Image (spheres, rainbow, N blue to C red):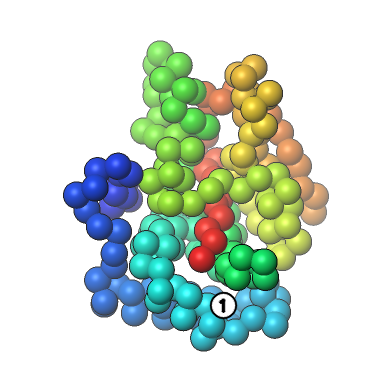
Amino acid sequence: MKKQLIKRGTGSLEKKLPLEKREELFKALKARFEKNMNRHQDLEWAKVQEKLEANTEKLWSLNEMELTGGEPDVVGHDKETDEYIFYDCSAESPKGRRSVCYDRKALESRKKHKPENNAIDMAADIGIEILTEEQYRKLQKLGNFDTKTSSWVRTPANIRELGGAIFCDRRYDTVFVYHNGAESYYAARGFRGELRV
């Protein structure tokens, strides 16, 4: 999965999907949208697709969310900015984004057994923002997510400055927020993102 991500700032590769991949992605997104109408009542797929067709870079990011196991879906529409909001809606934390520490500083602080990547850089490469605790709780109102895994969430600066980072999961039909050293990583912990189109 990692090799498919285009690094930001290289400038040599355009973030645009070939027509065949675009059609494949639209098919998957439409099917998921129609299967989970509770996540986006009163929204129409045709309007979402129209916005996506006009934003090829955002479409590329959605494809990266899909490739890394996020199963992105529409969870709302911001009327002020006229943007559709996508979250990773996979039942468990996206498989292609697990075993990562929180950020680059945490990755560089590890002397041994470094993970291959970190959540903040991966999100930037994909072109998404890591969910905040508030956004994560909003997602959990739409279903039961992370009942076996956990997901890093955007950590307030004061906690991060002291070496920590926060993550969430769902157990016992309750959403829990925990803390860990930002340099820690686990096979069952990834991160979820938001994309606005």
Tell me the residue at 30%/59% (across/down): 15
Tell me the residue at 64%/81% (across/down): 43
Q: Is residue 88 visible?
A: no
The residue tagged 1 is 33
Nearer to us in this view, 163 or 13:
13
Q: Amino acid at mark 1?
A: Phe
Q: Position of residue 3 (x, y in %)?
A: 26, 47
Q: Residues within 10 Å of mark 1 (few under 14, many from 20)?
A: many
Left or right relative to 8: residue 77: right
Q: Position of residue 137 (x, y in %)?
A: 74, 52
Q: Is residue 115 visible?
A: yes
Nearer to us in this view, 79 or 71:
79
Left or right relative to 39: residue 72: left
Left or right relative to 93: residue 42: right
Using the rendered view, name the quadrant where residue 21 is placed. Answer: bottom left
Find the residue positioned furthest to the front.
80
Left or right relative to 9: residue 106: right
Find the residue positioned furthest to the top.
111
Tell me the residue at 37%/62% (across/down): 57
Q: Position of residue 177 (x, y in %)?
A: 73, 38
Tell me the residue at 51%/86% (across/down): 46
Using the rendered view, name the quadrant where residue 52 is placed. Answer: bottom left
Q: Examine the rendered structure and indicate whether residue 134 appears above or below residue 79.
A: above
Q: How many marks?
A: 1
Q: Position of residue 109 (x, y in %)?
A: 45, 16
Q: What secondary structure is found at the residue carrying circle 1?
A: helix
